[in-house]
Amino acid sequence: MVSGTPQAAREARFCRADDGVRLAWARHGSGPPLLIASCWLSHLQHDWESPVWRHFLDALGDVATVVRFDERGFGLSEWEVDDFSLERRVADLETVVEAAGLDRFALMGMSGGAPVALAYAHAHPERVSQMILYGGMAGAGMNDDPEAETAFLAMIRAGWQRPDSTFRRVFTTSFIPDATEEQMTWMDELQRTSTNTENAVCSRVARHQTDVTPLLPEIATPTLVLHADGDRVASTWGPKLATQLPNARLVMLQSRNHILLADEPAWPVFRDEVTAFLADGQPRTTVENLSAREREILLLAAEGLDNTEIAERLTLSVRTVERHFQNVYLKLGLQGRTARAAAVARVLA
């Protein structure tokens, strides 16, 4: 056992989904409840020994009672499965919620777990007090290029369970390009120990058939979106999510790593933002989260210019100006007839 880790935190519990699949879950920490819909690579016990993940467990457990689980087909959950659809994954999350006795709780969607968190928050808004999306996406995962995705699937089939980590290192360097050799070696091995080749392929294919984008405008849950500006896995999804969610705040992190490492400057930013958000329950929306163009348009509106005049001043179409205003309202969580005045007031504050 890792020093400083309570034995109870390393004890997995088990429940069964409505189709009979066994799911492993665990609880640690203290404070208000936080349920994590994690990425596909997880192992409830091995993660405590991880030079890549351990600092997440420690930091979140310091401020919340953390409930996490291994998705079906991964970690300590049952591997003999064939349904990795979004609907099945949301149903599994619902099973864990009931098994853990959660009523109203904060929900964190990490990486490929974000669509599950978003779909759950859309279906059960009364249960989710606030939502955190980290390195998340609403739809397909790593490769939008079909040829590149075919190559990745071929690498999974060829090298996922080989003792030699050459093929798995391709995934590792995409996730944590700035990691040490020790961290990369651990990530290489996690892939092999967290699931088998068939599950890795099938789950990845299912994720590329997932897209919850149409749900985003209807999810009013206060949401904190954290995204690394150099992330090659989730690409530009963080800003897209923040723009389309009505009550979201975006925090960009200066990092190339999809999984923030403990010794990089972006990590304390992540930790402090999550801690503050869980404490106050609302995204701290400020004009600093707006683009330079959006602030420019608000300043022109403050001068009394209407949309047509702003469009002429900036050599834009009126429709483009209107779209910028809509993005501003979404980012700042504003709506109704007073939204324009409220946005202008904030940029002048």
Image (spheres, rainbow, N blue to C red):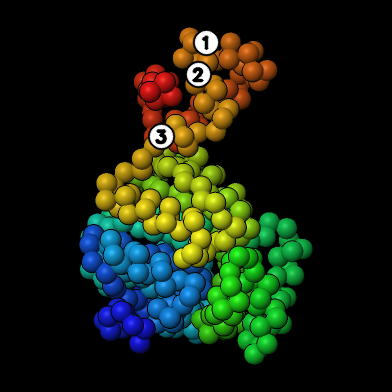
Question: In whole angstroms, how far apart are the C-alphas of marks 1 and 2?
Answer: 9 Å
> Which quarter of the rendered picture does the N terminus lie within?
bottom left
Q: Residue at x 65, y 78 (%)?
A: 168
Labels 3 and 2 touching (C-beta < 8 A): no
| Quarter where residue 335 is shown | top left
As drawn, 305 above or below 183: above
Residue 32 percent location from the top left of the image: 23, 59
Residue at 58 percent of width and 69 percent of height: 179
Q: Which mark is residue 305?
A: 1
Position of the C terminus, as image quadrant, is top left
Amino acid under disc 2: Leu
Indicate left or right for 100 with 79 as reference: left
Q: What's under tag 3, amino acid-wise?
A: Thr
* Label at residue 299: 2
Q: Callout 2 environment at 10 Å: few (<14), some (14 to 19), or many (20+)?
A: some
Q: Dot 1: few (<14), some (14–19), or many (≥20) neighbours within 10 Å?
A: some
Amino acid under disc 1: Leu
Q: Which residue is mark 3?
A: 286
Task: Work out whether mark 3 precedes mark 1 in sequence or the reverse, and give the earlier one.
Answer: 3
Image location of residue 48, percent across then percent down: 40, 78
- How crowded is the residue under tag 3: few (<14 C-alpha within 10 Å), some, or many (20+)? some
The answer to the question of whether label 1 and label 2 lie on touching residues, with beta carbons closer than 8 A, is: no
Disc 2 is placed on an element classified as helix
Residue at figure coordinates x 45%, y 49% from the top left: 225
Disc nearer the start of the sequence (1/2): 2
Rendered view: 232 above or below 52 = above
CA separation in Å, label 3 and label 2: 15 Å
The spot of residue 231 in percent (x, y) is 59, 56
Q: Nearer the viewer, mark 3 or mark 1?
A: 3
